[in-house]
Image: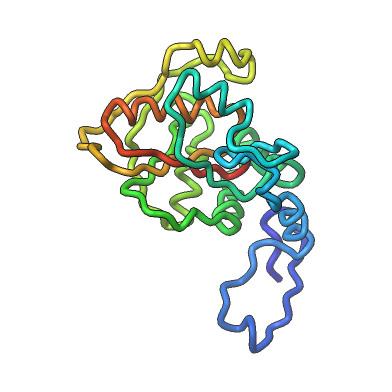
Amino acid sequence: MRRCLQCLQPIHEPLTAINIYKPPKLICSQCESLWQACRIKDKKQRCSRCLNQCGHSTQQCLDCQFLANRFQLMTQLYCDYQYTGIIKALIHQYKFMKDHYLAQVLAYQLKLPQIKYDYVVPIPSPKVRDDARTFNPVTTVLAYKGIQYINLLSTDLRPKQSKLSKIERAEASNPFYISLDIDLTNKEILLVDDIYTTGLTIHHAGCKLLENKVRKFSVYTFAR
């Protein structure tokens, strides 16, 4: 009997004419319900750019206003889930407990936006952290999904961002750099990261793209 990849309980799925040709479910109905409870539903009550929960419709939230004073903003954040509940627990177990197999659950649940872009570019982790974890949390999910991407960006090792204030993070030197010799002129880029919080990591990476004359960059994250 197959087991849920998330909670490891048996999956009870009777074979029917409807599901006989569908791929087998990777998670059980209970975990699926918990995922749906974390879905970002009412986007009218969120920032139109970064999906920050504002409580009222607004064109630009305070976070985006803060970023706009320092960066050219991303075009749009695409994200379907809040970083809470079962998703927060899964990402923590995946990244910090090094449970590589959970990448399959993320790949199964996540859907990249159907928009035009020239390159999918993952936000990198410092090599020393990927080596310690034995995998990169973003590219592993993209690989399971069969998404073509390019490792255009690299990053230097830097202090844990959770230990810095928002101002300290904004004023820190940009750790990212372009590591491939590619003409990016007028290209449209989709950056992919695991979690969107303040937006500073994304916009530091975006700076390097804009310096290389990309037309625009949008962002997809697993959760926000």
Q: Position of residue 174 (x, y in %)?
A: 42, 17
Which is nearer the eye, 152 or 7? 152
Closer to us: 12 or 48: 48
Q: Does 200 sit left or right of 174 as displayed?
A: right
Quarter of the picture holding the C terminus: top right
Q: Position of residue 171 (x, y in %)?
A: 50, 11
Residue at (49, 36) in percent of width and height: 134
Q: Residue at x 46, y 50 (%)?
A: 142
Q: Nearer the viewer, residue 185 or 110?
A: 185
The structure residue drawn at horizontal position 20% and vertical position 33%, both measured from the top left corner, is: 181
Q: Is residue 41 left or right of residue 68?
A: right
From this view, report whether residue 134 is shown above or below residue 10. above
Query: What's the colour scheme?
Result: rainbow
x and y, in percent, of residue 59 in the image: 59, 37
Identify the residue shown where x is 51% and y is 28%.
132
Q: Quadrant of residue 160?
A: top right
